[in-house]
Amino acid sequence: MSVDLIDETFRQLFRDELPERITALESLLADGPGGEEFNAFWRGVHNIKGNAATFGFHPLVSVCHSLEDLLKQYAPHAPAGDPEFRRNCLALLDLMHAAAGEGEDVLGEIQSRLAEINAASRTRSRRALLIGDSRSTMALCRQLLAAHRYDVVAVRDAYLALHRALTEPFDILITTGETRLLKGEALIAALRLSGSRNQNALAVVLTSGETRMRSHKRNTDPDLVLARNLKLIEELEAALVRIEK
């Protein structure tokens, strides 16, 4: 049996088992969940996301990301019997069934429905994607964004960040110049050329080097390049105030 045939066999097995795995997640929501049920639910979502990524079910990966973001809002456990939490989880689980399909039409439909569900489950009006592995810098940026009522998604892996930027709505992207696997400016250039909904989102690169912008800005360049120094938060806040007006 060829490697391709083996891969396709396991891929189809995952798709066949998906309804049963989603049903198992739904049963964990019956009583809350709280405590161990919450942890088991999170593990189940994470496992489905990993398999979906392995077998190329990108719309399903996007739904799992949204579910994990929702779970992080309630960590370490959801209040028992919280009706809003349960309602939002069930809406995303329903979307998982459709996300097992393939093709650009499926991806577009999933993105649209995800945006509606995410909007209904958020109390804040804006979303920010924060990319980098400097704990101190990321913590400062996260605090500032939270103060301006942004929902913050923090990612260390640049490829994963690019996937999320291409499939989920964000108002601002902030990335360090050096990130895992992909430079910050290359990530933004890829997003600018993608034609996705975030193609023109405000993009900021944080650098420990020089902060000079090009004399003739290209359409693939970031909007801002800010030095990671004592003035970083002041300058980033000024940028947030400008886009909020």
Image: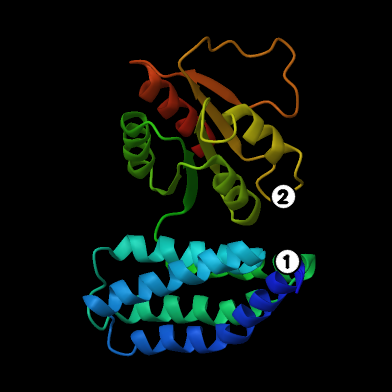
Quarter of the rendering occupied by the N terminus: bottom right
Residue type at mark 2: give it. Answer: Ser
Which residue is under mark 1? 3
Whole-percent x and y of residue 150? 42, 47
Tag of residue 196: 2
- Spatial CA distance of label 1 from label 2 is 34 Å
Give residue 165's position: percent from left, percent from top: 60, 48
User: Within the image, what quadrant is residue 148 found in?
Assistant: top left
Please name which of the two marks, 1 or 2, marks the residue nearer to the observer: 1
x then y, percent, for residue 152: 42, 48
How dense is the environment of label 2, judged by Cα within 10 Å: few (below 14), some, or many (20 and up)? some
Nearest the eye: 56 or 89: 56
> Counting other residues with Cα less than 10 Å from the Cα at mark 1, is it few (<14), some (14-19), or many (20 or more)?
few
At numbered mark 1, what does the secondary structure look like: helix, strand or loop? helix
| Front in this rendered view, residue 172 or 54 | 54
Q: Taking 41 as reference, is 14 left or right?
A: right
For the point 32% across and 32% down, the residue is: 140
